[in-house]
Amino acid sequence: MNLDVFFTPRSVAVVGASRTPGKVGHDVLADLIGSGFKGEIIVVNPETDAILGLPSYPDLQSCNRQVDLAVIVVPRDRVLDAIRESIDTGAQAIVVISAGFRELGEEGFEIEKKMVDICRRRAVRMLGPNCLGIINTHHDLNASFAGRFPDKGPISIFSQSGAVCAAMLDLCSTRHLGVSKMISIGNKADINEIDLLSWLAQDDQTKVIIGYLEDISAGEGFVKAAEEAAATKPVVIMKSGTTPTGLKAAASHTGVLAPLDSAYGAAFRRSGVVQAETFEALFDYSAALALQPLPRGDRVLIITNAGGPGTMAADAVEKAGLRVAILDNRTITLLREKLPRESAVNNPIDVLGDADPGRYAAAIESGQIDDSVDAILLIMTPQTMTRPAETALAVAAAIDGSKPVLASFMGGKDVLPGRSELSAAGLPDFDTPERAVAALKAMHHYSLWKNRPPRQITHFRVNRRRVERIITRRLRTGRSTVGEIKGKDILSAYGFKIPAGSLAITQEEAIEIAERIGYPVALKIASPNIIHKSDMGGIQLNLANSEAVEDAFDLMMLKIGKRAPEAQIDGIYVEQMIPRGLEVILGMNRDPQFGPMLMFGLGGIFIEVLKDVAFHLAPITESEAIQMLKSTRSYSMLKNRRAKHGIDIYAIASGLQRISQLATDFPQITEIDINPFIVGDIGSEPVVADVHLTLATS
């Protein structure tokens, strides 16, 4: 069933209503009455005949009424009976506000599971337990103890924390943001964020969805629901806390470098969710997305009454990856006609400290008709001649809705009248230019995602049977690791270029292999117990003749014998030396919630010291792979090298796509680490220098 009955019930029963102000059962009933709910309100309390002017019944059977929505506020040990009774009287939706369940331990968790079982057997949905309740301003429904009944508006809120729900409502009121729905999901025993995203995506009264989450119930389901919702309206989510995601395996760079919450960030980017890192940003982004149109591009016009704030804003724009717009000559000519001679008419436009409201309006009107401007940032600082309230009214009147206009009235009490007028006019206002620019960046990124071309996953021709045989044999022996030799066999089956090489047991075999594949060669220890070969003296490079191979073989076996005496030695791998190129790292780590998560980073200091890496969920498109590269801080160096030496970034993108296909095809693979992946000039084929894979043994 859908969730409509939660939001548009004809009758609501408050089971556990109280006569005592301050108790949750009293406040829920008071808020329901105070919201002006037009349907029937049924009060259940066996100890009184009436509460707040409404008759009270000892139980639901006694009232002889049809119940659509039951709000349960009774002690934990009475909740199961209350749920059964509610369902018996026809309730199709149940909100359990009562607490004391999984949040208190195993006993409460077991009761919670029984609650869900009762509801599912009768095809009834349940919100909570341990939640604040639910609000629908468009149905005059406040079935919560939030206290505040917000003004109607375009924003719908869901939160795992009831306290955060209450804070959200308060902040919406302060910032003059109207609310459509408020849903406190509490313990998420039945209804969770996936259900709400799917329902709110179809709700015509919701224009922006705001969420606060501490965990996600099912990763793949969340990505699907969030992607479908974000395709129709902005979804802004703040994720707090981290949960263990199995990314701590020290066997590879991929496992070590993935932060515990990187999977959430990758999931949000993939599904089009606007991620807010702070509570402040959650409302900054939501206000901008709810009240203004999306920008068509990244070019920002700055209008200010002081040079310093204009410079601050320009710096913030460039740091955010946006651009300070270059104005059309016609716009500059128009501005010179409308503004004083002393005004700066190039971007930022300085309307001067004595600017009256008309100057701001003229600058906005000029920017709106300039095709080289995608968004406008308006800045005002309090000066002697400043008229904040009048300026805000003039700005509101000048805006035609063709481009987003964000305002930053900087200061305190002197600009408060202007900020109030901006809010009343439905214009987002920010304390500082930096906060406004951050909101513009969020709007731009969402616009790019929403207008992206359809996702097309490349399916390469591969040899799956070869990989199946290798993995089956490895798992049959109970070994969870796949070393370099077999790992390269797997990658070769998926189209990666592998240098010629073979395993040698003796010096003679090593020399014979080297002669066959051609000098120079490299020697590498082959052992399931030695992952980082160079740390143990298990790699020798650029061996130019048989004598060098013989000496290196002896020296390597001697070092390994001393440094890792317990290690199982399978032999020494003799491999053709790889031509020089750019060293990058490609990886995959299978997140237990979201599945295969791909990693990219440059080698050397960028990976070891700066930990400059990017993540994306599989499967991945070519454009998404390119975007992974661009999202690293070191991309500028990669870009410069490409300009000088022709580094093939599309070859790197192809490697990421091939790993993506491998990880998707074989869920038994939990980790892949290609380090290094040597990338040459455009047209040359990248080469796998080393690889390590980990398998799930159960």
Image: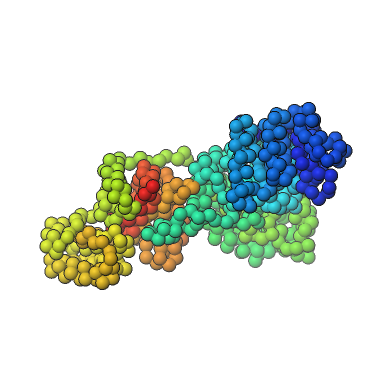
Q: Nearer the viewer, residue 247 or 599?
A: 247
Number of marks drawn: 0
> Which residue is pictured at 68% across the width and 48% down the height?
99
Displayed quadrant of residue 200: top right
Residue 455, percent from left and from top = 45, 40
Horizontal side of residue 153 vs 582, given as left or right: right
Residue 59, percent from left and from top = 77, 34
| In this view, 258 is above or below 151 | below
Q: Nearer the viewer, residue 292 or 643?
A: 292
| In this view, 576 is above or below 63 | below
Residue 87, percent from left and from top = 68, 32
> Which residue is pictured at 40% across the width and 46% down the height?
622
> Which residue is pictured at 50% across the width and 55% down the height?
244
> Which residue is pictured at 68% across the width and 34% down the height?
84
Q: Specify whether residue 332 is in view.
A: no
Q: Specify whether residue 670 is in view.
A: yes
Residue 358, percent from left and from top = 74, 53
Q: Nearer the viewer, residue 13 or 160?
A: 13
Q: Nearer the viewer, residue 270 or 316?
A: 270
